[in-house]
Each structure stands twice: as C-alpha cells, then as structure tokens.
Amino acid sequence: MDTRIFHFKDERLSAETAPSCILYVIVGVEGFSMLVRNRAGETLALEAWHFSKPGRNFQDAEADIRIVFGQTAFLAFPYEKILYAFSNPNVTLAPRRLFDREQLDLYFKLLIRPADFNYAYEAMPEFDCFLIYAVEESLRNICRPYFPNGRSIHLAAPLIRAFSTLHPRTDYEVMVNLRNQVAQVVVFDRQNLLFFNTFSFEHPNDLLYYLLMAYDQFRLNPLETPLTLAGNVLEDSDIYRLLYRYIRHIRFAHLPHHGQLPAAAVSLPPHCFFDLFTLPDIQ
C-alpha cells in the first residue's frame, strides 16, 4: 500500500492559476513525488509518497502509481509546462565512443528480461557519455493522459549533474540519494564521474554494504573520503547512525540555488527534497 509522507498545497494553486505554473514529477518504482512552482519561483505544492514494496520494474508499483494519480486532483490542472522524471534501476551509462543509438536494447541484455520496454537516452557531454534507460510502455501509457504535453526524462541525469556541481572537490567523493528503500549511488574524482548505480535495500546494513562496496571498488578509505547524503534520511535515524560508525565525514546535500521550500516544510531538512529540485528548468 502507498503512504503519503508529506503534503503541502498553497491555496493560491488552482485550475485558474495553474497555466502560470510548472509541474515537476518523479515517478518511481519506490515512490512518487511532485513539485509545483510559479513563475516567481515560489513553491505552491510539494508532495511525496512511499510505496510499501519497492520493486525493480514499474509493474511492481503500477497499482500504487494509479492510486496517486487518482487521489491527487491538482495533477490534472492545466499547467504551463510539465516535466516528469522516471526513477527505476533500468538505467546505465555508456562512454561516447561506445554508444550506438540504434541498439539501445543491447545495453540491457544482461540486466532485464525481454518485455515491452521503451528505450531512450540522454547525452551527457560534460561526462563524455550517454545515459540510457528503459521504461515499460505500460507506464508511459499511464502518464500520457495526465501529461499529454509534458517532457519526460530519467531522474539519474539531473541527479548526477546536481551532485557534480554541489560543491567544489579536490579528491574523491561518494554521494547517495535515498528514495524510500532505493539508493542511487554516485562516485566522483573531482568533477570526473566514475560510477553510478541503483540499489534496493531492506535494512540499514544492506545500504552500508552497498556504499562500502563502492568505496572498496575505488580503493577509497571511508574514514577519509566524504559521503554526501540526500533524500529521506535524517541525522537521528538508524541509517545515519550506522553509516557514521564506518564513514567519518558525512554531510547533507543542500538545495540548488533556485530551490525554495514552502514555510510548511521548514521543519524538514532541505536535502529531503533534493532530487525534485534538481529537475531542470523547461525552456
């Protein structure tokens, strides 16, 4: 069953004012989150849901996604612009020299079973690579009636970009965004992207294992190399306390410069909504 973990809607947001607003949505196998901002950059709506059984494919979350669409009336407002990002593990990076846009399915031959997937890609020239992802056609069919004029992307691309510019670095750094029980892990060497992967976990020990595995892969010392956290994790949580036993330098991500939380969310650390605010402006 789905659980709404945060809800805010400004009284100024209505079907009449929506044509001057932008809707940002993250549709994931682990949850659903959305943000509405007006032209002045004010946040008029902010909402997040967790799904009780995060899966690898969208079939696992289809029923929960339909419930969110059915229960959230302002999703159907006539927004000026809409950007929705998919969040699932069926995503990979390919170096530019090895990229073939005519055979996107081959990048997932060993990762997913053949199915009715829609394959797409996004160039990431700042890292000399392409991000390739697979989304079930059934999910796109759910989204299209709600977002007929919307633009779709994969969350991994803006997330990696935002992490890369979060703060200056002179050495290695590990960064992770937590969405429910899913961890999106990134490793940088200064501004060079070395690693991106998505892991599902049930217990804090599982998350620790995946993070230390990333440290070990690049022979990094967890007592020296910092870890940046974003998403649904708090300093007084079991996850944080366990990570701090093994990783000494932990800091929380801050929102991009244009990020602005509503007053109703001041009690929540900004890093909880980091991924929503990494979604790019729509031209």
Image: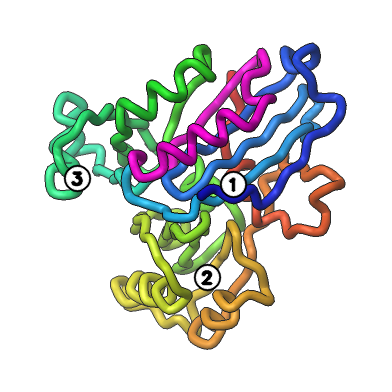
Quarter of the C terminus within the rendering: top right
- Tag 1–tag 2 contact (CB < 8 Å): no
Q: Residue farthest to the front?
A: 1
State left or right for residue 7 relative to residue 123. Answer: right
Residue at screen point 48% across, 67% down: 173
Q: Which is closer to the viewer, label 3 or label 1?
A: 1
Q: Which is closer to the viewer, label 1 or label 2?
A: 1
Say which quarter of the image contains residue 197.
Answer: bottom left
The range drawn in magenta is 58-87
Q: Which residue is mark 2?
A: 227
Residue at screen point 63% across, 19% down: 76
The circle on residue 119 is none
Q: Position of residue 155 (x, y in %)?
A: 46, 41
Q: Which residue is mark 3?
A: 112
Say which quarter of the image contains residue 36.
Answer: top right
Q: Is residue 272 above or below residue 275?
A: below
Q: Secondary structure at mark 2?
A: strand
Can you see residue 157? no
The circle on residue 49 is 1
Q: Residues within 10 Å of mark 1 (few under 14, many from 20)?
A: many
Q: Is residue 115 above or below residue 32?
A: above
Q: Is 98 part of what is drawn in magenta?
A: no
Q: Position of residue 104 (x, y in %)?
A: 19, 32
Query: Is 149 in front, or is 76?
Result: 76
Q: Residues within 10 Å of mark 2 (few under 14, many from 20)?
A: many
- Disc 1 residue type? Trp
Q: Secondary structure at mark 1?
A: strand
Q: Position of residue 172 (x, y in %)?
A: 45, 68
Residue at screen point 53% across, 35% down: 67
- Disc 2 residue type? Leu
